[in-house]
Image (cartoon, rainbow, N blue to C red):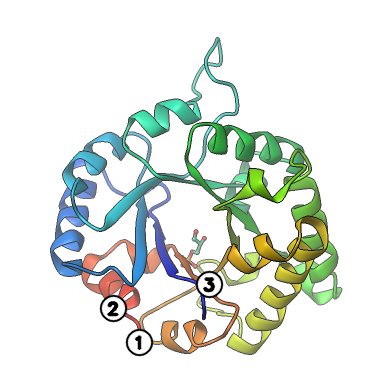
Amino acid sequence: MSRKALIAGNWKMFKTGSQAVATAKKLAQLVENMDDRDIMIAPTLLSLPLVSQNLEGTPVKTGAQNLFHEKEGAFTGEVSAEMIKAAGADYVIIGHSERRQYFHETDNGISKKIKAAFDARLTPILCIGETHEEKKEEKTFYVLDKQIRNGLKGFRSADELSGLVIAYEPVWAIGTGNVATPEDVETTHQYVRSLIMEIFGKDLANATRILYGGSVKPDNVSVLMSMQNIDGALVGGASLDADTFIKIIKFD
Ligand SMILES: O=C[C@H](O)COP(=O)(O)O
């Protein structure tokens, strides 16, 4: 791996505010000073400001799990990129498969969200990945191609996408214990990188961090991270417990 690793925890719809703060504080203590990798946790929006305040001055950064692309307005129940930034976040996860599945997010909407994230100086983590059926039908590359081209279609130059993070999360591997093999993930990440190169050029392709997500655990993280094109992990279940997550963060 030639890029600085990013280990990100997606807490999904788990933990109340006080539980989130307690876990975040414990994690920050366990992390101490680590500057050779980036670390991020994404609690619920309700906990985000409180968790961010409690992590100030530590290496653990925060992120949101979603945003709405408009700056403000009559959009009941939604939260803008600026509001997320003001809450202390540095990152935002966009287009997670659970949002695509349960909230019918489309590549078109995802493209707008990525633009809004960059405009607010948030680092977007664009999630892509195929379902079990798509894998069986050998459509993985076709699906990823569509998700990337359409998800990034509002962007004309590589400069506009500087700092972009992509998370490849095969849907069949999320929360199932069925982790993809490191070799298969590496092949897929190579494909994604070559696609970024084709569309936006070599510099962005080389700089873009491509994370893997899907049943990452302390006992499989090191071999995954030993692959040249796996630049970090987006961790769900195993990020909820600080003692477990720190083992993933400190992979060697
Ligand atoms: O965002 C994280 C992914 O959905 C992975 O979740 P998981 O580690 O529980 O499989």
User: Callout 2: few (<14), some (14-19), or many (20+) C-alpha neighbours within 10 Å?
Assistant: some
Which residue, given by chain and number where applicable, does mark 3 sit on?
A: 176
Q: Is residue 38 left or right of residue 115?
A: left
Question: In x, y percent, where is residue 106?
Answer: 73, 41
As drawn, 53 above or below 36: above
Is residue 219 placed above or below 113 in the rendered structure?
below
Distance from the alpha carbon under mark 2 to that under mark 3? 20 Å
Disc nearer the start of the sequence (1/3): 3
Residue at position x 51%, y 40% in the image:
66
Residue located beneath label 1 in the image? 252
**Amino acid bearing label 2:** Lys
**Side (left or right) of 135 relative to 53:** right
Q: State whether label 3 is within 8 Å of ligand 1.
A: yes
Give the amino acid type for the residue marked by disc 3 in the picture. Thr
Q: Residue at x 29, y 38 (%)?
A: 47
Q: Can residue 104 be seen in this view?
A: no
For the point 81% across and 61% down, which residue is it? 145
Front-most of 149 and 43?
149
Tag 2 secondary structure: helix
Q: How far apart are marks 2 and 1 (CA)?
A: 10 Å
Task: Label 1: state its secondary structure.
Answer: loop
Who is closer to the viewer here, 7 or 13? 7
* Residue where numbered disc 2 is placed: 247
